[in-house]
Image: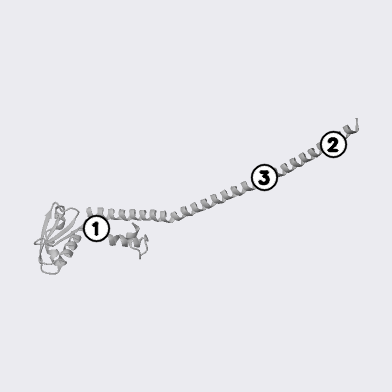
Amino acid sequence: MTANESSTEILRGEILADAQKKGEDIVIRARRDAETLLINANAEADQIRQEKLDHAREEAAHKRELILATVPLETGRMRSARIEMLLNSVFTEANRQLLERKGFEYRDTILALASQAITQMAGNAFVARISEVDHDIMGANLADEITVRVGRNVNVTILYEPDIKGGGVIVEDADARQVWDNRLTKKLERLWPELRRQIAEQVNFVPAHINVGEVK
């Protein structure tokens, strides 16, 4: 081998060695860059995952608060509905007993209702209209007994009529200009708002200072 050939071979070897070293450096840097990118990607993924988890927890907490906020309202609504149902059952039962004339002295009740109406009406002549089905219960002296209870000189005429429904009495003056409907069911309807208030208070449905109409 000549000197020139020897020098060329040495140079070629140096070039190859340098190229190999640079290639190895490039591979090492690429591996490091890839590892750095992977670490950063994993960190970013963890951050995104945590952010989504925190957001989901916040949403769940918000929904839980909304649900809990509706519980008292729903409980109050159900309680009000239950109270209303119970009060309506009381009204229905009271109405049934009045129609069946049960649980009270019916004749005395008629006397009281008739005399109460006449006491609050002007004039001296009145007609007490009573259901025909009550004729036998009332007896012959009903008008006189009503007059005694009124406490002033009045003339009371008793009329038994088939179209008077529900028991009780309707009182009119002689010219029918004053009319007092004291049938039992009508009397109950007039008294019921106050009665339902008292019932609701007595069984602790509502505090005494709250209008019972608020439970509807």
Q: Is residue 90 left or right of residue 114?
A: right
Residue 59 higher or lower than 178, as above or below: above
Element carrying mark 3: helix
Question: Would residue 181 be seen by someone viewing this image from the given angle?
Answer: yes
Q: Which residue lies furthest to the top in this view?
A: 1
Q: Which image quarter: residue 157? A: bottom left
Q: Residue 180 carries which label?
A: none
Q: Which image quarter: residue 98? A: bottom left
Question: Would residue 100 be seen by someone viewing this image from the given angle?
Answer: no
Residue 153 position, x and y percent, is 10, 69
In the depicted view, which residue is nearer to us: 101 or 166? 166
Q: Which image quarter: residue 203? A: bottom left
Q: Distance between the residues labelled 2 and 3?
A: 38 Å
Per the image, the residue denoted by label 3 is 37
Per the image, the residue denoted by label 2 is 11
Choose mark 2 or mark 1, whichever is in front: 2
Q: How far apart are marks 2 and 1 (CA)?
A: 122 Å
The three-letter amino acid code for the residue at tag 2 is: Leu
Q: Residue at x 69, y 46 (%)?
A: 36
Which of marks 3 and 2 precedes in the sequence?
2
Q: Distance between the residues labelled 3 and 1?
A: 84 Å
Per the image, the residue denoted by label 1 is 189
The three-letter amino acid code for the residue at tag 3 is: Leu
